[in-house]
Every structure is written in C-alpha cells, then in structure tokens.
Image: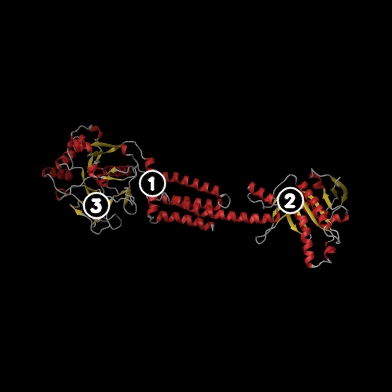
Amino acid sequence: MRSLIALVAITLTIWSEWMPAPTSSYLANEWLRDHFIRLRASTSPESRLAVIDIDENSLTSVGPWPWPRERIAALLENLLGSYNVRGVALDMVFPEPADAAGDTRLAMLAQHGPVVLAQAFDYSVQPLGVRVGRVVGGDRLPESRTFPKATGFIGNHAGLAQAAHVGNIGFVPDDDGMIRRLPVMTSFDGRIYPSLSRALMGCCVTNGNRPATTDRQGFRRIPFDRDWSAYTVIPASAILNQSAPPAVLQGRLVVVGSSALGLTDRVATPLLASTPGMLVHAAALSSLLDEEAGVAPSQWPGRWIAMIFTVLVALMATYTFPRLSAVANVGLLVLASLLWLGLAYVLSPHDASFSTTAPLAANLFLLAVAVPFDWQLAQRKSRQLLGTLRQYVAKAVVDELLRRGLKDPLTPQRLNVTTLIADMEGYTGQVESLTMEEAAQLTRDFLACLTKPVLEKHGTIDKFTGDGLVAFWGAPLPIDDHADLALDAAQEMVVAVRRFSAERPGKKPLRVRIGIQSGVAMAGDFGTSSRSIYTAVGDSVNVASRLEQLAREFPHDIIVGQGTAERAKRHSLMYLGEKLLRGKEHPTKLYTLEPAA
C-alpha cells in the first residue's frame, strides 16, 4: 500500500509536468512563478533599449490624443536623426488615414528607415474575428511547426502598406487576465507574422532573425527579469522639443508607446497589476537581446528534475513513514517542500514550461494520504500491543510504558528479571473427589489468590500452568527492586491461599509452592503471526521452576535462589543449605523468607 501511495504521488507529478494542467493547477504554478519573478527582478539598468512614453505630461504640453501624423513622424525623425537611435518600434496602430502630409512622412519612414509599425492580431475563439485595416508582411507558414492562430486583426490603413517591418502587438492573457507570454510568431491565412519585439530584432539587430525559444504552442514566456525602474523611460515631449540628452538614447533600440490612462493601453503583469503595454514589449525585447547575446539563462530539464525530486521524496516517505511519528513525517514533508521551493526558484529562469507546483502537489498528496495511512497503522499496532500487554501486565506498568513512549516494548531483549513460579501442592488429590464444575471453580479461586498479588506488585504474568502460574518482574519495564517485589507478591500469595483454605471447612487444606530466582533472561514477544505470547526464557527461569518443585521437600512454602537473595534489599532471608538441581553442575544455595516476628 505504501508503494502504491508513492507511485500515485510520482504519477501526479508526471501528469502535472507533461499533460495539460487544469486551470486551478495552472494558475497555482503561475502564482508561484509570479512571486519568483518579483523576488528576482533586477534593478540594474537596461542600457540596450529605451522607452518613449506618450504620458500625461506629454499630452498636456504638446496636445491631446490622437496626435497628428506629422507629430508622430517628427517624433520618429528626431529619434533617428538627432538622437541617432538604432531602431524604433511603434506600439500603436493607425487603421484610418489622417493628415496626408503626416501619413506620407510616416509611410516613407516605415518603408525606408529602421522603423517597425504595429498591427494587432485577434486570438478570440470566434471563427471570424474583427478585421480592420490591412495585414502587412509575413512569411509563408511552415508545415513543421505550430504557431498561435489568429482569427482577426486590426492593421494600418492602406497608405502604410509598404512598411518594411511590421510587428504584432496582440496578446493572449492567461485565465486570470495576466500577461505572461507573447506569441513570437502568429499564424494567419497561411502566413506567419512576428511580434513587435521580434520584428524590431529582425530590423535592426545582427542575427536578429534567429529562431527564438518558445513553448510547444509557439508562445514565449516573458521573464520580466528587470524591474520597471531598470528601463530608461523618456517623455515623448522631451524628444519633440529635444530637451532629452542625446547620449541617453544614442545607439539604443526604442519602443514608443503610452502610459496615459486615457489611452487604455494597460495590462496586468507579474510585476505590476496595471502596466503600460509598451513596457511589456520592452521586457520581451530585452529577453530577445539576452538570447541573441548568449547571456540568457541556459536551458535545464526542469520537468525531469521535478520528477526525480518527487521520486526521491516518495522513496524517503516509504522508508521513514513507518519508522517515524506522524509529527516527524509532517516535518519531513514540510522540509522537502521548502527545499523544492528553493530549487524551483533556481530552476524557473532556466525552464519556462515546467510546473513549479507539481512536486508540491505530490507532497500534499503524501501529507493527505500517506501520513494518515501510517498513523492509522501505528494506532492499530498500538492497540494490538496494548491488547497483548494487558493480558499479562499490570495496568500501572502499561500506563508507565505509554508515558515513556517506548517504541516497541515487546521486542525481545536481555533484562535482569526475577521469576516466580507457583502451583498448588497435591492438586490431583484435591480435585479427584470433586465434580467437574467444583474442580473448575476451585482452580479459578486458587489462581485468583496467585494472580492478584502479581498484578498489584506490578508483575507480568507469563502463563497459567493449570493449577499455577509463571510470573516475572523487570520486564517489559525495567525496575530496580524486582527481587523485592517478587518476594512481596510471594508472601501475599501464601497469605491469600491460607485465607482461602480456611474458608473451606471440612475440605483438605490448600498449600502453594513457590520458587523464586533472579538473573538475566531474554524477555519479549516470542509468538508467531497467528498468536502472540510475551514470555521470558533463560537459566534463571529454569532454576525458579526447579525451586518450585523442590519446595515439596521443605516445610517452607517459598524457596528462594541465590540470585534473588543477592538482589533483595527489603527482606530478611534464611539460609537452607545447598542442593544440586537437575541440569546443574554445581549445587545451588537455597533460602526462604525469615518467619515474621
């Protein structure tokens, strides 16, 4: 079952990494990536490009929108001439003609200069989207690749149809409305069209037409690796009146757009909930420049690393869950999750497609299923253990075992114990004249006289032997005064049996024979899978049995071995002499309790 749980956790990660994720899982991954982006965003200046902003101040000082085309053309001429920029991309579309002179100047700049005009493709699911203006440029659609497919467009008017470079500014937001990816190339009517940043690269950068890295659907994740403060943003009015320092723009690529609220060109990005669209294209351009310069993060196999990580966590869980407590296992999963978050933070710039949350989902599954499963197994094992213990061990001993939290107190171990063996003398003569019911009742009552002192003195009942029992002290819970406790119990047994015998007038008197010996024994559960038995085995147990049999030769009810005599601290013992016991090579010293004064 543990292996099956581990396999499901691994399968969950594989499914999350290689199969289309449901919306909730997809957005969880993006939410985590967004946090990574905000933590990692650099404020180091982006010196290769600049943004010209038709902001509120520019609209106030120069004039309201829409500006005459002559003003747009003048802005471009100043950038290309006075400021000697490398190339300009316009994040705006001109679907209708305006002032003829301005349109003519703009058309000439777009046809012969390093200027990229914009056109916006529509990616709605409707078969025929909006179609305004004219689509310009594009290459034949290759059959071997997949590109995002557009259903409509907003293009420039026919007077700008001769533009040499046109880029797409359309986008497809994620389900939460966030812009995280842009289509590098868009498929429409059998041709493919570049994005605005890609068109500017192709226009003005050596090797700028090199294929860019995309995902399987043809989208490129924008890394947003620079904070917006890292970009040089200059008001359009400062370009028109040429108050901006030329050195700030010389040799740079430029994106022209607007942050004015009235122009409604704002989108949500991981860095800011309301971001001017021109900055999204600037971030995309910065990413393409990094890739062209060979400084972009190298590609790592994020999916495979995530799967290997989950396999290692699943194997760890299979090993540790049955061996550690539920709290410790939860702690391990939390630690593994934190470790993965750190690893995912490092991996995310190197693989734009892997799921950062897949191993976390697997850990959550282990937390929700594997931890309770092993906890229930531990509870069931504990109940079985308690059930077994309570058959043999005093309640106080069981409570103490639970308090100490011993992992497996029934595991066989070598302990110093004192063994007590007692039975009824002349049992056959006692029951031969009794009915079966009377004999059974006599046996129960006699064993009760033996059992109660054992449990009251925190002993462990090993077994009943028909008319007697075997008990020991010092296991499963080690105790220092096990010899004295056994002697206490023996004295109480003798008193209880004499009292019980006195309550049977006219019947044969009862006598209990007790043998006690202390020493090292192996105590634990020596049962099988079908039956559990907790017992003690060893030389001291065998000697106690011999001493119990030897008691018939003495007038004393209790015969004590040398091991117990050496360990007893609270009892006075009387030496009886030595006796060679069966199976022993040397005589054994015998003792009994001193008679009460």
**Foreground of the two, 172 or 591:** 591
For residue 422, which quarter of the picture? Answer: bottom right
Query: Which mark sits nearer the N-terminus, 2 or 3?
Result: 3
SS type, badge 1 = helix
Frontmost of labels 2 and 3 is 2
List the residue tagged with mark 1: 33
Distance of label 3 from label 1 (alpha carbons): 27 Å
Q: Residues within 10 Å of mark 3 (few under 14, many from 20)?
A: many
Q: Given the image, on which type of amino acid does mark 2 rest?
A: Glu
Please indicate whether residue 305 sits to the left or right of residue 160 in the image: right
Q: Quadrant of the C terminus?
A: top right
Distance of label 2 from label 1 (alpha carbons): 65 Å
Q: Residues within 10 Å of mark 1 (few under 14, many from 20)?
A: many
Please indicate whether residue 151 sits to the left or right of residue 24 in the image: left
> Residue 117 in the image: x percent, y percent?
20, 46
> Residue 567 in the image: x percent, y percent?
79, 44
List the residue tagged with mark 2: 456
Confirm whether residue 583 shows in the render. Answer: no
Contact check, label 2 and label 1, Cβ < 8 Å? no
Q: Given the image, on which type of amino acid does mark 1 rest?
A: Arg
Image height check: is 359 above or below 290?
Answer: below
Mark identifier at residue 121: 3
Q: Quadrant of the N terminus?
A: bottom right
Distance of label 2 from label 3 (alpha carbons): 89 Å
> Residue 107 in the image: x percent, y percent?
15, 45
Please indicate whether residue 485 sits to the left or right of residue 311 in the image: right
Mark identifier at residue 585: none
SS type, badge 3 = strand
Frontmost of labels 2 and 1 is 2
* Residue farthest along the bottom direction in this orientation: 435
Q: Given the image, on which type of amino acid does mark 3 rest?
A: Phe
For residue 274, which quarter of the picture? Answer: top left
